[in-house]
Amino acid sequence: MFSLFAHAQKPRPERPRIIVSSDIGGTDPDDNQSMIHLLMYNDMFDIEGLVSSPSFGSGSADEIRRMIGIYEKDYDGLKKHAAGLVLPDSLRRICKQGRRGLAPFKGYDEPTEGSEWIVRQARRQSDRPLWILVWGTLEDVAQALHDAPDIKDKIRIYYIGGPNKKWGVNSYAYIAENFPDVWMIENNATYRGLIADGKRDGEVDSRYYERVMSGAGHMGADFINYYKGRVKMGDTPSLLYMMDGNPDDPEKESCWGGSFRRTAYTSRRVFERATTLNDTVPVYSVIELRMKGPEQLDIDQDSVCFTATIDRQTWPGYYLGNGLYAVRYSPKAPAVLSYTVSSGIKEFDGQHGTFVVDRMWPGKRCKDDYAVGGNWFTDCGDKEYFEGPWQGAGLIRKQRHEILEDWTERWNWLKDR
């Protein structure tokens, strides 16, 4: 079946080099959905790495290999229509294990197989930059930059932030502070325009699994295992961005993967006191709660020595040395949030506070902000592209039907055997 929308993709200068860093197999199964999408379209990329990072729970490079095994069963059916599809064994060879768990306060730790692979591929001689598509947190990207600062000008990052930024706030802060000139697309909310929404998408797209995927090969049979087949794929906009038009132009209009705006800063707020309802922070900002306490001569700097419970979740707090303690947090949505500190250190055990999270990102400039260079882009703040609280989501939502119809063609290849 020929897709009426196949022509909608705008031409690209050349096939992009990419590494995908994914927390697949962890807490959110939408990475499995996005991995299926990548495998079905892999002829459109030069894939140089598939990194599991950070690996939570059952997450590991083995989960990526499991997905490749499902792709392998459909490979012959897809190959008839797309000769450039990569052999399953070739994909297995570039699966790498990244960091297991999150980085400490300093934002990096020890090299991993994944971070070393990023460095290796970034240093390869090529006229094309290496794009790193980050579906989880920035742990292995931060580690690679720490270990090999020379790769900064050789890589470009498309980062699905929002909730991932909340979890990986320390690695994000390290990059923003130490590599402000790195080429970065920080997508905190625009990606939400691809997530299924029955109220906005209409009956056809909201029943996409039943209409299109059901009965379409082994990958179609597997897709039902993630969100019961409801198309979420919050990480897929990073792929769509590379597929549609010139990736060197983040401000391009009508791109399947979003349109972004250059920013000179990303928001950060530092509090050296308990916060109150009079304190407002931008959504997706880096918040540092700092406290004074005794000098600890018997523990290492960057050691966890207290916790902060924020929005019913517990976050590690660190000793920074010289009697200074801190915890970082990044709110993923507008809200009024409270926190409580728990510690064996009596000076701040039980400290609590409240703050307001505003919906505009990056918000008004503040002395604490990270100043970033001319190649840092983020969600469009135009009011017309908000979907509820989600900044920029309308830029993808208006193209969602077109995106899914293009994908329909590939699913139909698996029904034609």
Image (cartoon, helix red, strand yellow):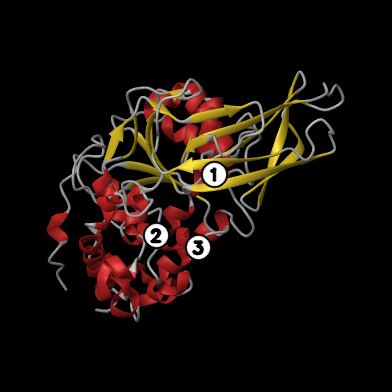
Quick one: quadrant of the C terminus? bottom left
Q: Are marks 1 and 2 in contact (CB under 8 Å)?
A: no
Q: How many marks?
A: 3
Disc 1 residue type (three-letter): Lys
Q: Quadrant of residue 154?
A: top left
Q: Nearer the viewer, residue 91 or 379?
A: 379
Give the percent coordinates (x, y) of residue 69: 47, 66
Question: SS class of the residue under badge 3?
Answer: loop
Question: SS class of the residue under badge 1?
Answer: helix
Q: Which residue is mark 3?
A: 29
Mark toward the start of the polypeptide (2 vs 3): 3
Disc 2/disc 3 C-alpha distance (Å):
9 Å
Residue at position x 57%, y 57% in the image: 26
Disc 1/disc 3 C-alpha distance (Å):
18 Å
* Vertical comparison of 112 with 88: above or below: above
Q: Which residue is mark 2?
A: 233
Left or right position of 105 against 357: right
Disc 1/disc 2 C-alpha distance (Å):
19 Å
